[in-house]
Image (cartoon, helix red, strand yellow):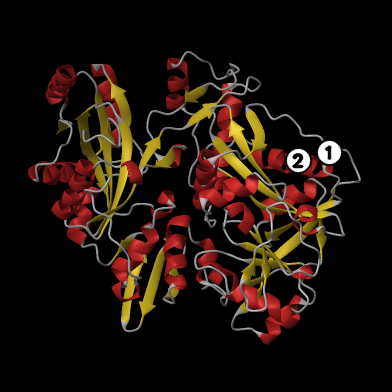
Amino acid sequence: MTECMKNRERIGPGGDPVVPAGPRERTEPGSDVVLDCGWGRLVFGQTFTHPSRVADVLRAEVEGSRDICVYLRDPHVLVSRLPDELFIDPSLTYRLHLDDREWTPVAQPGLRIRRLRDATDADAVNRIYARNGMVTAPVGVLVDNAATDRFVHLVAESATGDVVGTVTGVDHVEVFDDRQNGASLWCLTVDANQAPPGTGQALLRELAARLAARGRAFVDLSVLAENTGAIRLYERLGFYRTPMLCVKRKNPINERLFLPGLPDGYDRLNPYARIVGDEAMRRGIRVEVTDPDWGELRLTNGGRTVVTRESLSELTSAVAMSRCDDKRVTRRILAGAGLAVPRGRTATDAAADADADAAFLAEVGAVVVKPARGEQGNGITVGVRTPDALAAAVELARRYCPDVLIEELRDGEDLRVVVIDHEVVAAAVRRPASVTGDGVHDVATLIDRQSRRRAAATDGESRIPVDGMTREVVAEAGYAMDDVLPAGTVLPVRRTANLHTGGTIHDVTAELHPVIAGACVAASRALDIPVTGLDLLVTDPGRPEHVFIEANERPGLANHEPQPTAERFVDLLFPGTRAPRRLWSPTER
């Protein structure tokens, strides 16, 4: 049975799907129509002769997927009869009439909207789904669906050739000869790191134009009631509320939608604490928010209670924490364990001894100057090459810590590896903030827009500061802040890849070389720390060359989706709640 043929299922008397004779055969209303979207199935309630048949279909939901029943008459009656199995989705339904105005796509500089074509596109779509906490779909299903008239699966391609957004339309006439001549919209989402402003709106308008060209009368969508940003976008485009409800099955994916209210203060948690709380509640672990502004939780399961602050817990000793807190101590321990670190020294205190710092600079050519203790990139200067610049960099670092570390500048990509319970769980390359030209806006405007997008995507955690360093990096690339950046030109605007200053993160877990993975495990054991984020410089994540820069005792787990960082962290805290799994070995490639 081909994936195309599986897209539309009819349910036989025994509850098994009956496959139509051909992939383009349509189904008449009243035929119990179920459409496989990959991430789950759309159950068209208006085509079912009896609500009990809907319940049978939802019970057959595949583990790890999310089925949605739409257009069911009196859905509250079905849910009231099966409250332990089904629930009303806490979403709002919106409709856009397509026949009351002309729909023409609006060109977006640096963006191209087209149909999903192949497995490469589908992989990119799945990466965006995963990064935004959505259920992914089998690549073959996405590709086969996009090749049929039942689906209008679009992707947004940036000037760099990357897929940065996606939306799926379902043509109800092609699926079951819908007498209302309608369509629906699903899975509108964008890559917050790379998509230019307006990508979501461009995808919406293109989909509306294509469905209108087919003669469809309207397009419906369902959006979580709490998603006020998306609702504002839909209403600006002319969508209006309709009294339609969706029904879903109570499964682990949907738990946050039907469980009782969240603990007091939960809405004030930052993403790094919330990801831990979400995973704990998913397992039935009691979560108490003891300090929302600090990100502190008390987790209880049975007779065991653990206090956490984001990814830091009582399982990390004060000694291990202090080893990571002082970068000089981290270097000493890792070097003592035979691991590679850059050459370095502590900056001298007395002006009379400053010649020793200058001599080290002359010996290595270029250095990085950083506070011995600190985080979020504060006080760090990269690429110091002259004695005067060295003195200024040391003075800046001392504003954050009296002890200053001077390290040899090493080339390479900034790699963060998360190790939990002495196992590599995630690896990601962090890149400095950059903007992509559209041939219309100047550099300053592009930076401001990208900074606002990063802030929105990270709940204010990430912004691009417009300071002396930003202007200096732009000038070094040959541009002024008021220059219009040519379309497609990518311009780095910061030297460091810190996420708090607008840097982006790109998952490379599957590419990580076993030598690097093994070294990271050895580093976690040398520091005797159960959870750590190790920062390295590498020529390439898939090559063995590397040096350790520092260790973080409280790595941001939310930065590494879709890798199971929160799952492995809660496994460590409450091993009795872990699901059986196959361990990843650092020798595997």
**Label 1 secondary element:** loop
Residue 243 on image: x %, y %:
81, 67
Q: Is residue 349 visible?
A: no
Write down the quadrant of residue 21 in the picture.
Answer: bottom right
Q: Is residue 117 left or right of residue 231?
A: left
Which of the two residues, 4 or 507, is positioned nearer the viewer here?
4
The residue that mark 1 highlights is 103
Write down the quadrant of residue 39 in the picture.
Answer: bottom right
Residue 251 on image: x %, y %:
54, 72
Amino acid on which the number 2 mark rests in the picture = Arg
Residue at image location 67% in from the left, 42% down from the top: 200
579 in relation to 564, above or below: below
Residue 538 on image: x %, y %:
27, 33
Write down the quadrant of residue 57 in the picture.
Answer: bottom right
The residue that mark 2 highlights is 205
Residue at image location 62% in from the left, 27% down from the top: 110
